[in-house]
Every structure is written in structure tokens, then in C-alpha cells.
């Protein structure tokens, strides 16, 4: 009984990793991992050799910023943004050059900041929590500028399905490009804690080495991915279209009622209110949970008295609108 071409025979006795022989979920094995990687690559329309699976997008970011950047490296970061970077400021002592944004990313300012000494630029596209998104042309310009100074460009595409913009197919053209994704948003599998990196093949192999042993990737998440079918991919696409239609209806409601908001290319809308704490509590009393962004990291000026509302099912939209009107 031996491994053949990376395949694993499930009739084997698994006595190598000290697992409970009566347990239901064991460690991830090579054949299961490779099957999941191919499935994700199929979904992403990319070569499996360009894909690295991780325990969520946060783990993917940890790999990139912990192992690919030197201590005290300077990184360009539009703010407000996904708040992962606080850990790297404190633990890895990375230096984030923060660029305030409000109505979108100031491309000219970013260009001016991409100078020798910068080791990376991080972009979430669409941005969380503001929801703005850059075009392929704008992203490509920034990737090219980063390449000129030997800096990596990290593009977080956690919400890319909702805007339809991705640079994943450029990873072989630009070896400095790293794309981060998750299956928790559009795919609706947040609890599985699976993320993935898309990058050029050589770097993908390196990141797999530093990530560690295969069984450190969530087995439950791997199984969920391996159970996905073409029908599931089609269903996900339909759901994304429906969420975007519902978002459009919700935005029209906000416009009709004079509610200030940030135009969003993601599956949420950030709204400006008079008292975010009060609105959040009133909605909670009606069993509706939203996020208070008032104290969001590096967003105090832009996000003061703002709340972030995830777009609900179409059938729940009228309930949200009624509750929000009474809470404002």
C-alpha cells in the first residue's frame, strides 16, 4: 500500500497522525487537498498550480505579509480598509503608509506614493467597509507601478463576484501580483474557514511550503469544496445577480428617503445616520443585526455615525426598510 501519483486510498488504515480512529473529521490528506484545489481553480478559471488553499482569507494575508516581506517593510494602504493590518503593525512591525479615502481611491496620490522603499501595496477590491471598486485598467496601472520598484501588489478580492472585476488572470503576466480570496462571501461558506491565494506558480509553491503541512488546512472546508458541483456554481451566480438586484432596490429606497450612503460594488451598503449606536440598538430590538462603524479602525472621520448593512434576501428587504425607517 503506497501513495501513487499523489492519490490516497481511503481503504488505508490511517495510523500516522495520531488521530482518534473513531473520529468523524480527520486531517486533510493530499488527494483531498488536490481535488479541492482543482475545484477552486475551476471556479476561478485559473491553473491549479497558481492556487494555494488556506484557513480563511486572514490566514492567506498572514502568509503573504509574514513570509514575503522583511521586518519593518513599508506598505501602502488605503484607509479605511479591512482591519487585518493592526496585527502586522504590532507583531511584525510592518510600517503601513496610510492613504485616506472617502469617495474612492485617489489613484494619482497612490501613484505619487509608489516610490523606492515601498515593499507592497494592499488593495481590497471592492473595498470593505466603503464598497468602492477600481476598474481593471486602474488596478493594472497600480500593479505595473509596483512592479517597477520591485514591490508586490496584494489585491484582496473577497467581494469580487459582486462587482465582476478581477485581476486573477494577470498573475502569470505580473509576477509581483498576489490575489487573496475567500469562500465565505458569495459562496456562502463562512463557517468552513477556507481562503485561497492566486499567484504565479513559483510563489505559489513557496507559499505552500511556508504554510506548513497539508493537514493544517481545514478538513471540513476541504470537504465542502469537494462537494461543490457545476449546479452549485450556477446557483451561486444566480444568487449574486439576485443580491445585486436587491441592492439596487435598497439603494433606490435610500435615495427616496434622503439617506446618505456610500455607493457600493459589494454585497453591503454603508449608511450615514445621525446616531449609529441608537440605530443599531433599535434594529437589534427588531431582531436585525447590522455593524456599527463609528469606531472602525482608521475610519473615525469618514465612518463617524455610519452603519454597514449586508444586503438581505429579497423576501426580507421590506422588513429591513420598514425597520430602518423607524430607527432613523
Image: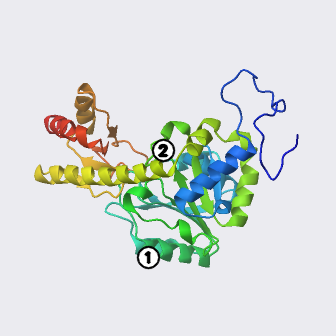
As drawn, 90 above or below 10: below
Residue depicted at x 65% and y 37% = 219
Drawn side of residue 317 relative to residue 130, left or right: left
Total of numbered circles in the picture?
Answer: 2
Where is 115 relative to 249, above or below?
below
Specify few, some or many for label 2: CA neighbours under 10 Å numbering under 14, 14-19, or 20 or more.
Answer: some
Task: Determine which residue is flagged by label 2.
Answer: 184
User: Which quadrant is the C terminus positioned in?
Assistant: top left
Which of the image's four quarters has the N terminus?
A: top right
| Badge 1 element | helix
Instruction: Please name the residue shown 60% across and 76% down the image.
Output: 173
Please indicate, yes or no, whether residue 67 appears anywhere in the rendered image: yes
Q: Which residue is mark 1?
A: 137
CB atoms of marks 2 and 1 within 8 Å: no
Is residue 182 left or right of 316 when viewed as pictured? right
Percent coordinates x, y for residue 24 in the rendering: 66, 26
| x and y percentages locating residue 264 in the rendered image | 31, 57
Q: How is the image coloured?
A: rainbow
Residue drawn at x 19%, y 38% is: 324
Q: Quadrant of residue 286?
A: top left
Q: Position of residue 293 (x, y in %)?
A: 35, 43
Could you say which is closer to the camera, residue 26 or residue 123? 26
Q: Could you say where residue 280 lies in the image, as x and y percent from the top left? A: 27, 34
Q: Nearer the viewer, residue 117 or 264?
A: 264
Residue 225 location, quadrant: top right
Residue 82 seen: no
Q: Identify which residue, 95 or 242, lies in the foreground.
A: 242
Q: Secondary structure at mark 2?
A: loop
Extreme-right residue of the structure: 1
Residue lying furthest top: 22
Amino acid at each position: 500500500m503506497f501513495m501513487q501519483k499523489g492519490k490516497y486510498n481511503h481503504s488505508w488504515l490511517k495510523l500516522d497522525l495520531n488521530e482518534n480512529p473513531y473520529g468523524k473529521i480527520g486531517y486533510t490528506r493530499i488527494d483531498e487537498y488536490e481535488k479541492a484545489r482543482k475545484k477552486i481553480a475551476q471556479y476561478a478559471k485559473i491553473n491549479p498550480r497558481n492556487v494555494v488553499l488556506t484557513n480563511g482569507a486572514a490566514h492567506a494575508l498572514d502568509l503573504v505579509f509574514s513570509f514575503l516581506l522583511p521586518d519593518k517593510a513599508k506598505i501602502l494602504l488605503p484607509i479605511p480598509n479591512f482591519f487585518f493590518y493592526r496585527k502586522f503593525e504590532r507583531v511584525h512591525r510592518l510600517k503601513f503608509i496610510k492613504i485616506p479615502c472617502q469617495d474612492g481611491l485617489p489613484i494619482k496620490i497612490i501613484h505619487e506614493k509608489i516610490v523606492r522603499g515601498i515593499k507592497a501595496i494592499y488593495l481590497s477590491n471592492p473595498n470593505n467597509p466603503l464598497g468602492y471598486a477600481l476598474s481593471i485598467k486602474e488596478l493594472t496601472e497600480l500593479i505595473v507601478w509596483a512592479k517597477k520598484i520591485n514591490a508586490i501588489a496584494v489585491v484582496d478580492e473577497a467581494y469580487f463576484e459582486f462587482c465582476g472585476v478581477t485581476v486573477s488572470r494577470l498573475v502569470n503576466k505580473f509576477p509581483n501580483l498576489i490575489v487573496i480570496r475567500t469562500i465565505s462571501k458569495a459562496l456562502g461558506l463562512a463557517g468552513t474557514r477556507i481562503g485561497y491565494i492566486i499567484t504565479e506558480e513559483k510563489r505559489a509553491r513557496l507559499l505552500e511550503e511556508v504554510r506548513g503541512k497539508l493537514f493544517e488546512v481545514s478538513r471540513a472546508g476541504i470537504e465542502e469544496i469537494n462537494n461543490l458541483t457545476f449546479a452549485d456554481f450556477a446557483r451561486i451566480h444566480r444568487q449574486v445577480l439576485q443580491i445585486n438586484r436587491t441592492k439596487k432596490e435598497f439603494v433606490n429606497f435610500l435615495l427616496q428617503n434622503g439617506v446618505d450612503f456610500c455607493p457600493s460594488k459589494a454585497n453591503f451598503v454603508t449608511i450615514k445616520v445621525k446616531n449609529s449606536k441608537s440605530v443599531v440598538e433599535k434594529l437589534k430590538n427588531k431582531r436585525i443585526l447590522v455593524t456599527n462603524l463609528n469606531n472602525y479602525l482608521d475610519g473615525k472621520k469618514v465612518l463617524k455615525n455610519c452603519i454597514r448593512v449586508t444586503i438581505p434576501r429579497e423576501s426580507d428587504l421590506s422588513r429591513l426598510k420598514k425597520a430602518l425607517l423607524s430607527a432613523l
